[in-house]
C-alpha cells in the first residue's frame, strides 16, 4: 500500500521523543477492571490472561501484547483495552511468561519471536470463546511478535481480521544496536536490570543451565541475549536469535490488513525498522510514520493516545 499520511501532531512539549517515551511509560495512568485467567501451555508452563469486557455481549475481541519487561497492566496496554471496551469490543491483555508477577515454571521465558505462545493463546480463545472477529495489537516486542505470527502463518484462523503493530523493532539486530548507543543508555540499563533480576531465581531452579558467573558477566543487554535469551530458546547465539525472530523478513507474506505505526523520532528503531519497501509491495500493509511519538508515546489531548484511536479507526474500516 502507499505509505499513509499522518495527522499526528502533539503539543510542543511531547514532540521530544524522550519526554513522550518517559511520560507514557512512567507517568500516564489508566484505570481498568480486569479479570485474570490462567491457561496451561503444551509444555506445562502457564500464561496469565487479563480480560476486560464491553458493556454489551460482544462477538469481537482484541488481543493486546506488551513489550519488553512489560505486563498487562501497563497503560499502553490498558489504554487501548479500555477504548475498545467502550466501543463494543472485548479485550484480553496477555502477560508473557514470567511477566504477570509470578515466575514461570520453565527455564525458558519469552522473546520477540515466541509466536508459539501467541498461537496457543489464540487456540485457547477459539476453543473456549465465541468470537467471530479477532484483532491483534502488539507493542514494541509484542508488535514484532504480532507481525511475525501473521507473516509466518499462511493459514491463519478465519476469525483473525486484522492487526496493529506499534513502535515495532522489526529488525531486531538493528534495534539492539540502537539500544546500545549512548542516547539510549538509561533505557538499556533499566531493561538489563529488570531482566537480570528475573534471571537470578532461575539460577536456583536450574543450576545446570546457568551459573552465577555467567549472570555476573551480563554487562549489556546484548550479553543477556547471548547468555540467556538465545540459549534458553534454542538459538545458537544472539545473532541467530535476532535473525530468525525479526518480523521484517515475514512482512511480504502478510495476507491480513495490517497497520504499522512507527514514529520517526523513536530512538529504539534503526533505519531498517521502517519497512517502506515491504509496505509498498504488499497491499495488506498500511505503514504510518509520524514525525513524533517516541517509543509507544503517542500522547494526545484527550484521555486516549493517537495510536489507540488509529487502531480503533483502522478496524472499523475493515
Image: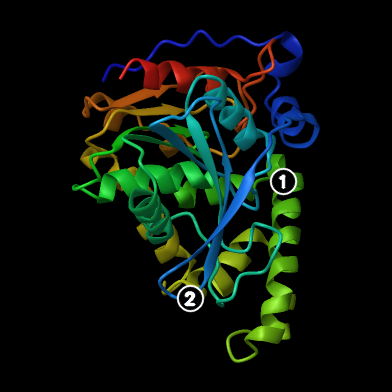
Label 1 Cα crowd, 10 Å radius (few <14 / some 14-19 / many 20+): some
**Quarter of the image holding residue 157?**
top left
- Residue for point 63% across, 29% down: 79
- Residue for point 34% across, 27% down: 276
Q: Is residue 139 left or right of residue 149?
A: right
Residue 261: x and y in percent read 47, 26
Residue 163: x and y in percent read 38, 33
**Quarter of the image holding residue 214?**
bottom right
**Quarter of the image holding residue 31?**
top right
Question: How far apart, in angstroms, are the residues tagged by discs 2 and 1?
Answer: 33 Å
Label 2 Cα crowd, 10 Å radius (few <14 / some 14-19 / many 20+): few
Is the C terminus in the top left, top right, bottom left or bottom right quadrant?
top left
Residue 226 vs 124, above or below: the answer is: below
Q: Label 1 belongs to which residue?
A: 187
Q: Label 2 belongs to which residue?
A: 44
Q: Is residue 277 left or right of residue 225?
A: left
The residue at the far bottom in this view is 208
- Residue for point 48% across, 54% down: 112
What kind of element bears circle 2? Answer: loop
Is the N terminus in the top left, top right, bottom left or bottom right quadrant?
top left
Q: Is residue 277 left or right of residue 196?
A: left
Q: Earlier in the sequence, mark 2 or mark 1?
A: 2
Seen from the viewer's position, the closer of residues 61 and 302 is 61
Residue 296 vs 240, above or below: the answer is: above
Residue 73: x and y in percent read 68, 43
Residue 239: x and y in percent read 44, 63
What kind of element bears circle 1? Answer: helix
Seen from the viewer's position, the closer of residues 139 and 6 is 139
Amino acid at each position: 500500500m502507499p505509505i499513509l499520511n499522518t495527522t499526528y501532531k502533539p503539543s510542543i512539549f511531547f514532540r521530544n521523543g524522550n519526554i513522550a517515551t518517559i511520560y507514557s511509560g512512567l507517568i500516564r495512568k489508566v484505570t481498568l477492571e480486569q479479570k485474570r485467567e490462567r491457561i496451561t501451555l503444551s509444555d506445562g508452563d502457564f500464561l496469565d490472561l487479563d480480560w476486560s469486557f464491553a458493556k454489551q455481549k460482544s462477538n469481537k475481541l482484541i488481543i493486546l501484547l506488551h513489550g519488553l519487561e512489560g505486563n498487562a497492566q501497563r497503560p499502553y496496554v490498558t489504554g487501548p483495552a479500555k477504548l475498545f471496551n467502550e466501543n463494543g469490543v472485548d479485550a484480553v491483555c496477555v502477560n508473557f511468561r514470567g511477566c504477570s508477577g509470578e515466575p514461570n515454571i520453565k527455564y525458558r521465558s519469552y522473546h520477540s519471536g515466541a509466536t508459539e505462545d501467541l498461537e496457543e493463546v489464540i487456540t485457547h480463545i477459539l476453543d473456549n470463546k465465541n468470537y467471530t472477529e479477532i484483532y491483534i495489537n502488539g507493542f514494541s516486542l509484542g508488535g514484532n511478535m504480532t507481525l511475525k505470527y501473521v507473516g509466518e502463518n499462511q493459514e491463519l484462523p478465519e476469525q483473525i481480521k486484522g492487526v496493529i503493530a506499534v513502535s515495532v523493532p522489526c529488525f531486531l539486530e538493528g534495534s539492539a544496536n540502537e539500544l546500545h548507543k549512548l542516547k539510549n543508555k538509561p533505557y538499556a540499563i533499566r531493561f538489563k536490570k529488570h531482566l537480570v533480576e528475573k534471571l537470578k531465581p532461575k539460577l536456583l531452579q536450574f543450576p545446570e543451565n546457568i551459573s552465577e558467573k555467567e549472570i555476573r558477566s551480563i554487562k549489556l543487554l546484548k550479553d543477556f541475549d547471548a547468555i540467556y535469551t538465545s540459549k534458553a530458546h534454542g538459538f545458537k547465539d544472539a545473532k541467530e536469535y535476532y535473525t530468525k525472530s525479526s518480523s521484517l523478513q515475514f512482512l511480504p507474506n502478510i495476507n491480513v490488513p495490517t497497520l504499522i505505526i512507527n514514529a520517526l523520532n523513536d530512538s529504539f528503531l534503526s533505519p531498517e525498522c521502517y519497512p517502506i519497501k515491504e509496505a509498498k509491495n504488499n497491499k495488506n500493509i498500511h505503514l504510518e510514520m509520524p514525525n513524533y511519538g517516541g517509543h509507544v508515546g503517542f500522547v494526545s489531548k484527550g484521555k486516549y493516545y493517537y495510536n489507540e484511536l488509529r487502531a480503533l479507526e483502522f478496524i472499523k474500516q475493515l
